Amino acid sequence: MSVYALIMAGGSGSRLWPRSRSRQPKQFLPLLSDKTMVQDTAARVQELIPAERIVVATGQDYVDLAAAQLPAVPREQIIGEPGGRGSAAGIGLGALLIKRQDPNAVMVVLSADHLIRNVAAFNAALQAGVEVAKQGFLVTLGITPDEPHTGFGYIQRGALVREVGVFSAYRVARFVEKPDRVRADEYLRDGGYSWNAGIFVWRVDAIMQAFQRYMPQLYDQLMEIEARGGPTEPAAFDGVWDKVANTTIDYGVLEQAEQMAVIPVDIGWNDVGDWNTLTSLANSSSVGNVVQANHIQVD
């Protein structure tokens, strides 16, 4: 059973304007290393998932940019969405492409704008997720919280599913929307909650069955795109994509799914979502300035 990765590299990165611009959004910028964020994402999993088994979902305007930055990824595995329709549709397109290559594949879903400092632990967690996914579970990696953050969704864990090495997989009791500070404090004290990082592992047939059951309209639209040449054929989107609802995978599928598991992990994760987050992650000077260029610093 082969393992593929879908890198979600859509979005305009507007919260990091003006560094991130519509012609080159944050996922295609070197914000925290000498590699761009999408390059870091691909490199992070290279020991587990080689470039020939990586699929990228991005905007139609960024296909050439993604291909230039990821030359080892086959160009025919870079999907250009005509417009943003949320993570459910993007994941569905990626699943179509992977299913065509290997109907029995396990699919890892990654975001191109995440920072992960402990790469070894991350890959070990993904391998544990693959083992649980082989049983038919839709698996998410839940980040162990270290503060009562109100900017992330949370996942409450239920009964233990199985142990895989040093990792434990639990049934998902429920997904919780971004809480206020009081509830975030409660979740942290409880200890049974993880941050929802949007890192997923599942069999490609399992997620397609979930789309068919929980999002039948999207499933039919995906099938129409597939029948018209598939997600890398621009003409396949004509007359279909503009009718696709803008929905997250969490709301459309995961919050309803019965075979949902979470693996709590501590991997040095962060979502590089805005300037405050980026500033806190970058190396700053003694007076708190962050500079990524040759410069003259005054005060």
Image (cartoon, helix red, strand yellow):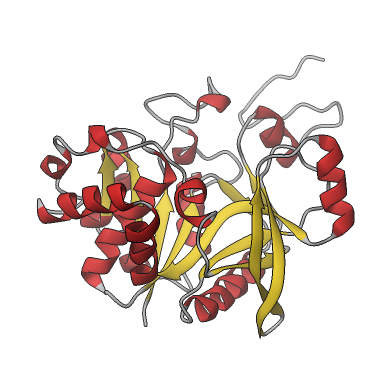
Image: 103 above or below 210: below
Q: How many marks?
A: 0
Residue 116: x percent and y percent?
A: 63, 55
Image: 254 above or below 290: below
Q: Is residue 63 left or right of residue 228?
A: right
In the image, 32 versus 87, the foreground residue is 87
- Quadrant where the C terminus lies? top right
Q: Is residue 202 left or right of residue 128?
A: left
Residue 281: x percent and y percent?
A: 72, 41
In the image, 294 versus 51, the foreground residue is 51
Residue 259: x percent and y percent?
A: 52, 70
Image: 296 above or below 260: above
Residue 236 is at least partly visible in this image: yes
Residue that sits furthest to the top in the current view: 298
- Quadrant where the N terminus lies? bottom left
Q: Quadrant of residue 53?
A: bottom left
Residue 70 is at least partly visible in this image: no
Q: Is residue 74 left or right of residue 227?
A: right
Residue located 82% across and 28% down the image = 288
In the image, 249 versus 36, the foreground residue is 249
Residue 172: x percent and y percent?
A: 63, 64
Q: Is residue 231 left or right of residue 196?
A: left
In the image, 6 versus 228, the foreground residue is 228
Residue that sits furthest to the right in the current view: 189
Residue located 86% across and 57% down the image = 190
Q: Quadrant of residue 267?
A: bottom right
